[in-house]
Structures are given as structure tokens and as C-alpha cells.
């Protein structure tokens, strides 16, 4: 697989001051292709273990070594209920890790569920988490998510970031309004200065933007 001319790759590279990329790439590419991705602004690899078409966990250690070499992070889309069986492998990666959508599990399971407690432990020990994807965890008005988001932010306020999750792929019911999703952050992180860090300061550090 040669990473030659691709529209997303060219767009990313042409806008390094405001764009970063998370890649889904195979192992075994020529070094020049990985270097080209890094130069264009790719800063991490995403593992999707919930839906088809992504990278599974079979080669997690090899990808971890690749990310260490390239100074990339690893991003996981995983159901928190799977984490008790996966946490030890993830903890051995020795690269920054990011968990999508607060663990992408039913919010009704609650803060005390084993999976969410495992996620909290990983975040406490250095992982990042996206305070995002509310519509994937609960139904409107998303009240069940407030204690989850607050618990994650309380344990690592400097490693929480927000994301819109647009364009809401693999979601087949009512499409959420991004503005409504952003408004939820005021309930999750009530302090304005801390909320600004989630929106600005923390992502700047994670993705390598200048402020």
C-alpha cells in the first residue's frame, strides 16, 4: 500500500497550523510512508474494536512499537465493559493512550460498574479520555452521563478533551445537533476555566498545536 496522492492527506498537510490526523494504517509500510504521514500532521493511530473496518487488537504490541518510534499516541474505540480483560495489555504500550466517548458503554451501568472503574483507573494512571459521544451512551436529555463525565474530569482534568464525533457514523437513529452536544459540557465541567482547558489547552498539548 503506497500512500501517494490522497485528498485527505494533501488537505491535512496543507493546513498543519489547524489540522491533525488520526490514522488507520497497516503495519509493514515503507518507512517513507509513515514519515510522510507524520510530516502531514498525523499524530496517532486509532483502534476500533466495536465496528468493522478498523484495526483490531491482534497486533497491538507491534503498533505500540510503531507509535513509540513515530512519537504518536494510540486511540481506542472500545466498550468499557471489555476493559477489565484488556487493561493490562493497554498499560504496557508505553505511549499515550486516548479513550473515545467516555468508554462507549451504556451510561445506565453507572460509575460503579466494573468497566467504568477500570477506565477510571487507566485515566488516573495517565490515559486521556474524550468527553464526547453522549448520544451513543444514553438517550436525551443525557442526565445519566453527568456523573460519568464528572468522575473522569475529576480524576484527570488535564487529560480530558471534547469532540463533536461528527459526522456521527454508525448511528442509525435521530442525528444529534452538534451545538446541543457542546452545550452538555457546561453540565459536565461547570467551571469556565476548566472547561476552556478541555476545549483548548488540553487538545493543544495532545495534538501538538501552538497556543
Image (tube, helix red, strand yellow):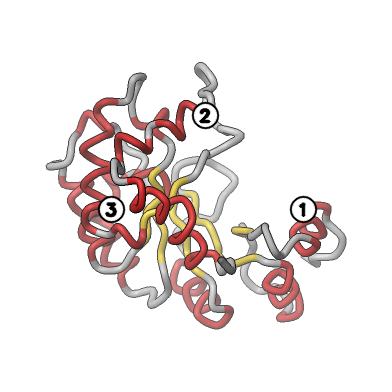
Residue under label 1: 8
Q: Secondary structure at mark 3?
A: helix
Q: Does label 3 or label 2 sit earlier along the sequence?
A: 3
Q: Does label 1 or label 3 sit earlier along the sequence?
A: 1
Q: Residue at x 55, y 83 (%)?
A: 69
Which quarter shows the N terminus?
A: bottom right
Q: Quadrant of residue 185?
A: top left
Which quarter shows the C terminus?
A: bottom right
Question: Mark 3 or mark 2: which is in front?
Answer: 2
Q: Does label 2 or label 1 sit earlier along the sequence?
A: 1
Q: Quadrant of residue 4?
A: bottom right
Q: Is residue 131 visible?
A: yes
Depth check, front residue: 161 or 81: 161
Q: Residue at x 39, y 33 (%)?
A: 134
Q: Secondary structure at mark 2?
A: helix
Q: Position of residue 137 (x, y in %)?
A: 35, 31
Q: Residue at x 27, y 60 (%)?
A: 156
Identify the disc placed on residue 83.
Answer: 3
Mark 1 surroundings within 10 Å by alpha-carbon count, few (fewer than 14), some (14 through 19), many (20 or more) = few
Asked if marks 3 and 2 touch (Cβ < 8 Å), the reply is no
Drawn side of residue 43 relative to residue 111, left or right = right
Asked if marks 1 and 3 touch (Cβ < 8 Å), the reply is no
Of all residues, the one furthest to the right in this rendering is 5
Depth check, front residue: 157 or 88: 157
Task: Classify 23 as above or below 94.
Answer: above
Q: Position of residue 50 (x, y in %)?
A: 45, 42
Disc 1 from disc 3: Cα separation: 32 Å
Q: Position of residue 9 (x, y in %)?
A: 77, 59
Q: Position of residue 7 (x, y in %)?
A: 83, 52
Residue under label 2: 179
Amino acid at each position: 500500500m503506497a500512500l501517494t496522492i490522497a485528498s485527505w492527506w494533501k488537505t491535512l498537510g496543507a493546513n498543519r497550523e489547524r489540522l491533525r490526523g488520526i490514522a488507520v494504517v497497516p503495519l509493514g509500510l515503507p518507512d517513507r510512508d509513515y514519515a510522510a504521514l507524520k510530516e502531514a500532521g498525523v499524530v496517532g493511530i486509532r483502534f476500533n474494536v466495536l465496528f468493522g473496518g478498523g484495526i483490531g487488537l491482534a497486533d497491538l504490541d507491534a503498533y505500540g512499537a510503531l507509535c513509540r518510534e513515530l512519537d504518536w499516541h494510540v486511540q481506542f474505540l472500545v466498550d468499557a465493559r471489555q476493559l477489565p480483560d484488556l487493561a493490562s495489555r493497554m498499560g504496557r504500550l508505553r505511549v499515550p493512550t486516548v479513550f473515545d466517548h467516555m468508554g462507549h458503554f451504556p451510561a445506565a451501568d453507572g460509575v460503579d460498574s466494573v468497566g467504568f472503574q477500570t477506565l477510571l483507573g487507566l485515566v488516573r494512571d495517565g490515559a486521556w479520555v474524550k468527553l464526547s459521544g453522549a448520544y451513543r451512551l444514553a438517550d436525551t436529555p443525557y442526565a445519566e452521563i453527568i456523573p460519568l463525565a464528572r468522575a473522569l474530569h475529576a480524576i484527570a482534568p488535564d487529560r480530558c478533551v471534547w469532540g463533536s464525533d461528527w459526522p456521527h457514523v454508525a448511528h442509525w437513529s435521530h442525528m444529534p445537533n452538534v451545538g446541543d452536544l457542546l452545550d452538555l459540557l457546561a453540565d459536565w465541567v461547570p467551571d469556565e476555566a476548566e472547561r476552556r482547558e478541555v476545549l483548548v489547552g488540553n487538545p493543544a498539548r495532545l495534538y501538538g498545536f501552538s497556543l
